[in-house]
Amino acid sequence: MTVDKNTNSSIGGSQSSPSSSARTFAVLAILMVVALVVLCPTLRMGIWLDEYLSINSSTGENIIAVVTNGFGRQDDYHPPLFYMVLNVWMKLFGGGDLSVKIPSVIFGLFTIPVAYCLGRVCHSNRIGLLTALFCAISPLAQFLSGQCRGYALAGLLSAIALTAYIVLVRTGSGNSVSKSASVSAFLVSAIAIAALCYTAYVGCVLIPCLGLASTIILVRHYAMTNDAKLRKQSLQTYGKCVASLILAFLLFSPWLPSVMNQTSGALYLDRTPLSRFPEVFFWNWMNMLPAHIFFGPALLAILVLVFIIRTMQRKRGGAETLAGSDDSSAGENSFGLDRDVAIILLTVTIIPCCLMGYITTWWVGYFRYVYPFCPAAWVLLATFVSLTFWNRDGSIGKSSKMALAAILVILSAINISWSIFRTQIPNSGLNTVAQEALKGQFDNTAFVICPDAIGPTLGYYLPEDARKAHHVGLFGFAKWDDTVIPANIPDMSKPWMTDTLIEDTLKRIDQLAAAGYKYVALTRDSDKQLELLSSAKMPRKKRVDELLAALNHKYKVISTKQYPAVTEDVTITRYELPQQ
C-alpha cells in the first residue's frame, strides 16, 4: 500500500503530529456543531405514527419490562435495544415530543467522529474527514437523527462494527498490531454487530455480507500466492473474522424466537415484483449518497465527469492514470483502497441495495433501512472524491481545490436548505389538528380517522382528558374502536375486507348524534400514502374513497381543510350531523 502524508500504512494509521490531530479534532467538532444546528429545528416538528410506536414500545416499569413486552410484539416489528435506551431516557427527562428525539440526535452526532475513524482505518486521514463530512450533511442521516426511532443508533453501531471488523481483517495483512488490539477488534466487532441486530433487524444482513466478503478475501489471498506461511496467516485471519460473526450471531440468538413469531404474521401488503429490481436498487443507492434523492444522479454525473477530465489530464502529463495508485503495490486497486477493504465496503453496500425492498414489507419509504449500510458507501464515495481531486503525492492543485470546494459548498447548501425547508411543517398534520381541537375549534366533533392505523398520533396530542373537556371523539376506519391503540399488524387487513364495511360505518356515524356529537370530521391520510399502503388484502384507498362519497351524499359538508406535513399529510372534511 502506497504511503504518503495522508495515507495509513498500518492498522492505527500513520503517526499524526499534535497540530494535525488538533486540526482534525477541530474539523470534527465543527461538523458536529453544524449538524446540531441543522437538527435543532427538526426537534420541534413533533412526532408521527412510527415515533409514537417507539414511545409506546418503550413504556414499561423498567428495561426488563420493555424486553418482556417486546418479545414477539405484533404492533411494532422492531427489536428492543433502542426502546431500552428510550425507556431510561423518558424516566429521566419525560416523554414529550421534543425530549424523546434527543437520544437519536446524540447517536447521530456521535456517528460523525466514528465515520471519520472508519474512513481513516480504511485509508487515510483525508478519507476519514471526507467520510465525516458526508455523514454530517447526508439528508438521510439528518432526517433519521431527528426521529424518535432506532435508525440513528443503528447507523452508529454499524459504523463501529465496520471499523472494528476492518481492523480485524487487516491484522493478517502484514500490519503491525498488538495482540490486545486484535482481541479488542474481535470483541468490539462482535458486540457491535449483535447490538445492531438488537436495534434493527436489517442489521442481521451485515453478518452474511461480512462473511461473504471475508470468504472472497480468503480465496483471493490463496489465489495470489503458493506460500504456505502466507496462506496459513490468511486462514487464521479468516478464522478470527468468522468467529467474530458467529459470536455476534450467538449473542443475538436468544431473540430469534421473537423474530420468528413476528415474521410469521400475515403480511397485508403485496410483495415487490422482481420486475422493479432496477427501480429498487436505484432508489436504495441514491439514498446512500450524501445528497437529496433528486440531486444524487447530478452529483454522480459531475464527479464522474471531473474524474474523466482529470484522468485525461494525467495521461497527457505522463502521470499515473489514477491518483494514489501504485503499480508496485498489490494492496491498492482502482478505488485507491486496500483491496481487502474495498471488497468489504462494496459487499456491504451492494447487497443491501439489492435486498431492501424485498426482505422488507414494501419498497417505497423503506429507504431508512439502508441507513445502517451508508457509512460504507460514504467511505467509497470519499475515496472516489480523493482519487478525482488529489494528486498521487497527496497534494491538491489550486484549480482542483476550488472545484472541490465549490461542489461541497453547493452540496452542503442544498442539503441544509432542504433540512431547514422541511421544518416549516410538522411531521404529522394530526399535530396541527390537535392544537386546533385544544383551542375549541372541534368541540362536539367525532373524528373518523382513515386509516385507523394513524389514530395513535392524534391520541398522543389529544389525550383523553382533553377529549372529554372538548367533547371530542376519536374513531377509526376500518377498525372503529380503540383507534388510539396501535393496531395488531397481522389483523390489520381483516376489517378492510368486510363486505358491509361502508354500511356498518354509516350506521355508527348515524348514532353519533345521540351521543351528543354535532359534527363528524372525516380525517384522511394523503391519497399517495393510501395508495402505497393499499393491497389486494387491504384496499385502503378504494374503501376510503367509497366512504367519502357516501358521506358527501348523505351529510352536509361544512368545510374541507388540508393539514400539510412531512409524513402524515391529512385532509379533514367536516360534516354536520342531523340532530334528533
Image (spheres, grey):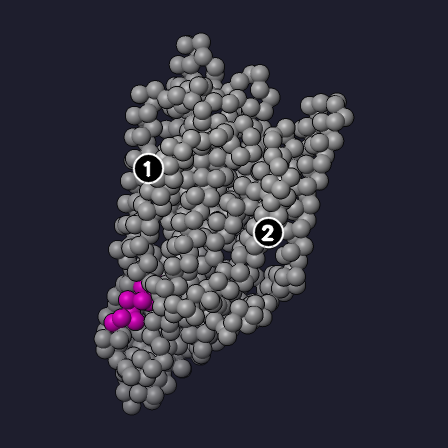
Q: Looking at the image, which residue is at 35% across and 84% down?
A: 512
Q: Can residue 286 be spotted in the picture?
A: no
Magenta stretch mostly in which secondary structure? Answer: helix
Secondary structure beneath label 2: helix
Residue 230: within the magenta? no
Q: Residue 82's spot in the image, x, y percent? A: 50, 60
| On screen, residue 130 above or below 355 | above
Q: Is residue 321 left or right of residue 435?
A: right
Q: Residue 408's spot in the image, x, y percent? A: 33, 34
Q: In this rendered view, identify the residue nearer to me: 168 or 554.
A: 168
Identity, as a three-letter code, of the amino acid under mark 2: Ile
Q: Which residues are magenta?
A: 428-436
Q: CA distance from mark 1 to mark 2?
A: 35 Å
Q: Looking at the image, which residue is at 39% across and 21% down?
A: 395
Q: In this rendered view, identify the residue nearer to me: 540 or 62.
A: 62
In which image quadrant can residue 74 be found? Answer: bottom right
The label on residue 224 is none
The label on residue 191 is 2
Q: Residue 465's spot in the image, x, y percent? A: 34, 82
| On screen, residue 235 above or below 140 | above
The quadrant the C terminus occupies is bottom left
**Mark 1 lies on residue:** 411
